[in-house]
C-alpha cells in the first residue's frame, strides 16, 4: 500500500515488536510496497532488520497462511519466506483491534515492481521452484481454494445501480461510467467463467499446494537464490492457479516444472479459468472500493489505474 495508515504509527510498530517479539528496534520506517497489506522495515543499530506486515481483518486466514509458510520452511523448502514466531510461539499477533501483525526476516536482494515474468531464464527458475512446491505434501493449516469470484455479489448489485450517480468519492462516477460501458463484456466473461468452472470441477487431477500470486514482484532474488514472499493467498488448488503466470508454451519452462513436479502438464481449460478469475476478481474488488466512501490518495490513484487495465474503456 502507498498510503500509511493513520491508526498505525512507526512508534506503535516498535512497541508491538518489543512487546510480542522481544525485538528492540532503533528505527522503524513505513514501506510503501505491495497492495493489500501494510508494511514497515524495522532495524537495530548494526544489527538485524525485520519486515513487519499488518492486515486489517481476516486474522484467522492470515494465521493459517503464516502457519502454512512456516511448516513449508521447516520442511527445508528454502524458497519459502516464513514468519518469525513471537515470544508465545504464535506467528501473528493482534497489535490493535481489527489488525493482525506478523514479522518476517528482512531479505537482502531485489525484486521487480510489476508481476510479469519477462526474463526467459528466470521463468525457468521459477518453474522449477513451483514444481517443488506443487509436489510438497499439503500442510495441515492449508485452506482449500474455491471457485468463487471475490465480491461477485456486490458487482451484481453495482450493475443494478448503474442508472443513478455514485457518490462515494472522486472515482465513484468514473467507475460507474466505465462499468456501464463494459457491461456486456463483463457479463460475457462471467458466463464464460461459469462454464469453465463446471469443466475444471470435473477433472480428477489432485489439487496441490499453491502460492496464489507467484508473480515476479513477489520473488526476491538473493545471493542464495529465489525467495517467494507474501504467502497470504496460499491455498490447496489446481496447479494452474500458479502456472498461468509462467506458462508460455516453452519446452524449457515445462521441462523445468516437470523435473520437480513429475510428468504433469497444465490443462488448457484450467489455465483459461485462472486467466479469467483474476481480472474478474480485480474488477469486482475495485468497483466495490469506489462505491464506498474514499478520498483522493496514492492508493486510490493506483486502484483506478488497475481498474482501467482490467475494464475496457
Image (tube, rainbow, N blue to C red):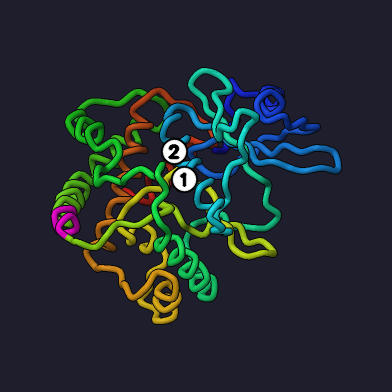
Q: Where residue 189 sits: x, y (%)?
A: 20, 52
Q: Residue furthest bottom?
A: 251
Residue drawn at point x = 57 percent, y = 38 percent: 2
Above or below 231: residue 61: above
**Taking 36 as reference, is 23 left or right?**
right
Question: Which residue is drawn at the image coordinates 50% and 52% (left, top)?
Answer: 72
Q: Which residue is mark 1?
A: 68
Q: Tell whether position 109 is magenta.
A: no
- Give the residue at mark 2: 64
Point out the residue furthest to the top here: 97
Q: Secondary structure at mark 2?
A: helix
- Residue 246: quarter of image: bottom left
- The residue sitting at 32% across, 53% down in the picture is 237
Q: Position of residue 128 (x, y in %)?
A: 48, 70
Q: Main secondary structure of the magenta part?
A: helix
How far is disc 2 from disc 1 in space, using C-alphas?
6 Å
Horizontal side of residue 310 vs 79, given as left or right? left
In the rendered view, does 216 fall on the left or right side of 110?
left
Which residue is more in the foreground, 67 or 292? 67
Amino acid at each position: 500500500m502507498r498510503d500509511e495508515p493513520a491508526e498505525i504509527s512507526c512508534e506503535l510498530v516498535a512497541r508491538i515488536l518489543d512487546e510480542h517479539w522481544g525485538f528492540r528496534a532503533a528505527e522503524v520506517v513505513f514501506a510503501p510496497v505491495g497492495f493489500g497489506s501494510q508494511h514497515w522495515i524495522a532495524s537495530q543499530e548494526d544489527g538485524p532488520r525485520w519486515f513487519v506486515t499488518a492486515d486489517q481483518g481476516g486474522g484467522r486466514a492470515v494465521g493459517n497462511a503464516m502457519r502454512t509458510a512456516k511448516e513449508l520452511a521447516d520442511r527445508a523448502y528454502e524458497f519459502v519466506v516464513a514468519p518469525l514466531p513471537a515470544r508465545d510461539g504464535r506467528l501473528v499477533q493482534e497489535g490493535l483491534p481489527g489488525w493482525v501483525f506478523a514479522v518476517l526476516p528482512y531479505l537482502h536482494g531485489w525484486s521487480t515492481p510489476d508481476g510479469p515474468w519477462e526474463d526467459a531464464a528466470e521463468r525457468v527458475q521459477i518453474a522449477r521452484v513451483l514444481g517443488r512446491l506443487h509436489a510438497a505434501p499439503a500442510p495441515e493449516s492449508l485452506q482449500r481454494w474455491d471457485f468463487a469470484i471475490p465480491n461477485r455479489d456486490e458487482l451484481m448489485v453495482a450493475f443494478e445501480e448503474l442508472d443513478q450517480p455514485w457518490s462515494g468519492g472522486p472515482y465513484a462516477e468514473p467507475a460507474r461510467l466505465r462499468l456501464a460501458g463494459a457491461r456486456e463484456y463483463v457479463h460475457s466473461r462471467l458466463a464464460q467463467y461459469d462454464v469453465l468452472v463446471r469443466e475444471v470441477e470435473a477433472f480428477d487431477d489432485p489439487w496441490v499446494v499453491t502460492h496464489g500470486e507467484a508473480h515476479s514482484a513477489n520473488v526476491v532474488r538473493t545471493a542464495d537464490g529465489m525467495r517467494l514472499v507474501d504467502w497470504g493467498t496460499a491455498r490447496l488448488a489446481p496447479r494452474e492457479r500458479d502456472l498461468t503466470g509462467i506458462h508460455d508454451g516453452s519446452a524449457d519452462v515445462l521441462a523445468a516444472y516437470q523435473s520437480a513436479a513429475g510428468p504433469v502438464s497444465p490443462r488448457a481449460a484450467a489455465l483459461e479459468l485462472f486467466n479469467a478469475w483474476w481480472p474478474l476478481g480485480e474488477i469486482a474488488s475495485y468497483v466495490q472500493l469506489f462505491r464506498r466512501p474514499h478520498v483522493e490518495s496514492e492508493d486510490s490513484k493506483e486502484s483506478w489505474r488497475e481498474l482501467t487495465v482490467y475494464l475496457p474503456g
